């Protein structure tokens, strides 16, 4: 899960223009960037090996001026895919930044955290 | 600039083993991942075009249990390279996560922020 | 310019679901795929060299059961960028195919043609 | 299967020079571009996942002024690989265009169609 | 320049089959692999930045059982492109290995050396 | 296994600066370049298909003025991964060249050879 702190201006522009900014629809672009980013995890993280990914889902919702990006990645492989999920939300967050930066650079990405992981060497569940 | 909140255990392991964890030297690997990540910015961010980068520097220092990643990217091109710098620190942060996750998944990436930008359409300076 | 011959069923599904099919919004995804594909031209075409692209635009409109994809690519470089434009529309067409193929494989891509080119060694204008 | 409509001039040049044009042997280059392009399918098509490909074959023959590109892709995976085959012939067609465009831009790519598919969710056989 | 020491058997097979081995025409494939490899230099070598390459030529000739690969890379940029040339011949050599290894693994790549370099910070000329 | 013949000057500089040269720690960078290079084998070698790699290890030691790079690549797949190992050591060798070339271009890469291979169609053991 990644949070992106936007500004009031950016949120208003999104609403006024049906989620469109100068560079086009922000969240749909970010979702695709996240999905494609997950496929590049092994290319980006030096010691990650290429894993067969079965599905990647990326969703974005807003709470006030915060965009909340969540990703669910599934694999039939025996290794965890938490890096793929974290890469997906990180790249989606960067794509949001890129599309909104013409309005303001006062955007903050993070926290980016693993929420839950099952399978692999151990399970993980973040405490609320 | 990106922050990565690690745990006391991870920091101690790094110190005890001369900054080495099971997967190898953490920060040097993350620095290289960040430099190589900056070169992939246009490949990751849908509406970023490939820019001729003149230099990418990535540095990491620790304060207590926090790793602080900074990146300086320079170009002779006319377009800003803030996305390259933000991609560099984001990928470096993901690489740190990957190398430390065998010890704990209780790692938080962020905030990731632009600190300063000169050139391009406008300058930017983050307030302290 | 690339044409993609879809079926009546696909077109109806798109209209009924506000241009959404099982895999998501078809044309917006194809537009982004085309833009990102243009950036990979040198990676795909063996004897194309990497060019500094200034802008890539991809647009899609429908006439009856035909999706018509057009792309405009601009560069300040001295070499023509017709391969970038043709790659953009080809990849966008493949993305449309991918997103609609759950409904029907009876989809035909083409003709893909260069419409107009200015600059480089020679200009080109396709006859109507 | 993809067709590429060339001109009489291009075909004659190919014959006169033993299938060589200024940029080198056209069809052999296009075949390799197609094979390598198939491996990039997941990188090009946003919602395609990386599949383990067992073999990719690309063949090109000419009928009059038409180059006919066929590709056969096999996988032991459970998912269809029609997108890999269509990407292979599309990239091969673009490579032919690139190598012949110094002689004429009056080249048309298409139709590109799936001929036959076995396995995956359903089989497919194009009607003659 | 890179040398690849092949075996008598491989050389004979190449001659008997008009330079074709089971995987296809060896040298033409290797030349294309080298040209495409040069374009990936910045992607492979961590501290190389992407350079605008103007032309890459790769040639292969045989002396007895040795394949000799030479590459000439040109740029209008101010930085040397010796890494691009060395990457081109290295990748071409690996491609030759790959295509001949079904006949014998007794193949040796090297020496790989820079022969001549003009421009950049300093010129270089290898002594005979 | 790949050898890189360096110069006395380079070796001394490495020792004096704790294996650091102007571009940073040479061998650690080369090791990572090799590991990441192995993951790009199918992208570099036209007729290699993407294989699921289980682990890649790259090690470098020096004998006098020679850097000796060895790589061990493992897969659960049924196909040999000798190309991945050879690509790993080749890219690591190129990275060493790149980092040392500011001191001298009088560096020779090679021989690069397969030492041992088990599994796949046949085993292989290089004679001493």
Image (cartoon, coloured by chain):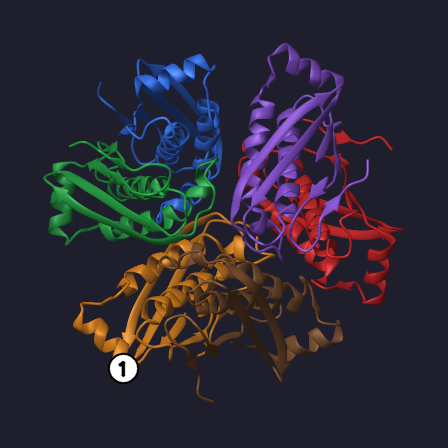
Chain colours: A orange, B brown, C green, D blue, E purple, F red
Instruction: Name the residue located 42 percent from the left edge and 63 percent from the top edge.
Output: A91
User: Where is E19 relative to C67, above or below?
Assistant: above
Residue F23 appears in view: yes
Tell me which corner region of the image, top left, top right, bottom left or bottom right, holds residue B79. Answer: bottom left
Q: Quadrant of the N terminus of chain D?
A: top left
Q: Position of residue D118 (x, y in %)?
A: 34, 28
Q: Nearer the viewer, residue C113 or D75?
A: C113
Kindly give the residue lying farthest to the top in the view shown: E16
Query: In the drawing, does residue A42 fall left or right of residue E108?
Result: left
Query: In the drawing, does residue D46 fall left or right of residue A81?
Result: left
Q: Position of residue C110 (x, y in %)?
A: 24, 32
Q: How many marks?
A: 1
Kindly give the residue lying farthest to the bottom in the view shown: B128
Tell me which corner region of the image, top left, top right, bottom left or bottom right, holds residue B96. Answer: bottom right
Q: Position of residue D95 (x, y in %)?
A: 41, 32
Tell me which corner region of the image, top left, top right, bottom left or bottom right, holds residue A68. Answer: bottom left
Q: Nearer the viewer, residue E112 or E114?
A: E114
Instruction: Name the residue located 61 percent from the left edge and 45 percent from the top edge.
Output: E84
Query: In the drawing, does residue A107 fall left or right of residue A40?
Result: left
User: Where is B29 relative to C91, above or below?
Assistant: below
Instruction: Name the residue located 74 percent from the left edge and 40 percent from the top edge.
Output: E113
Please, what secondary structure does the residue beneath circle 1 have? helix
């Amino acid at each position: 899960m990644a949070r992106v702190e936007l500004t009031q201006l950016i949120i208003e522009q999104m609403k006024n223009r049906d989620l469109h900014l100068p560079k086009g629809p922000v969240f749909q672009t970010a979702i695709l960037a996240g999905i494609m980013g997950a496929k590049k995890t092994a290319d980006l993280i030096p010691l990650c090996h290429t894993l067969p990914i079965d599905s990647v889902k990326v969703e974005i919702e807003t709470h006030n001026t915060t965009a909340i990006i969540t990703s669910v990645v599934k694999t039939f492989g025996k290794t965890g895919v938490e890096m793929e999920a974290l890469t997906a939300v990180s790249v989606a967050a960067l794509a949001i930044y890129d599309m909104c930066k013409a309005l303001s650079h006062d955007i903050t990405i993070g926290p980016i955290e693993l929420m839950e992981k099952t399978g692999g060497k151990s399970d993980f569940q973040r405490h609320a």
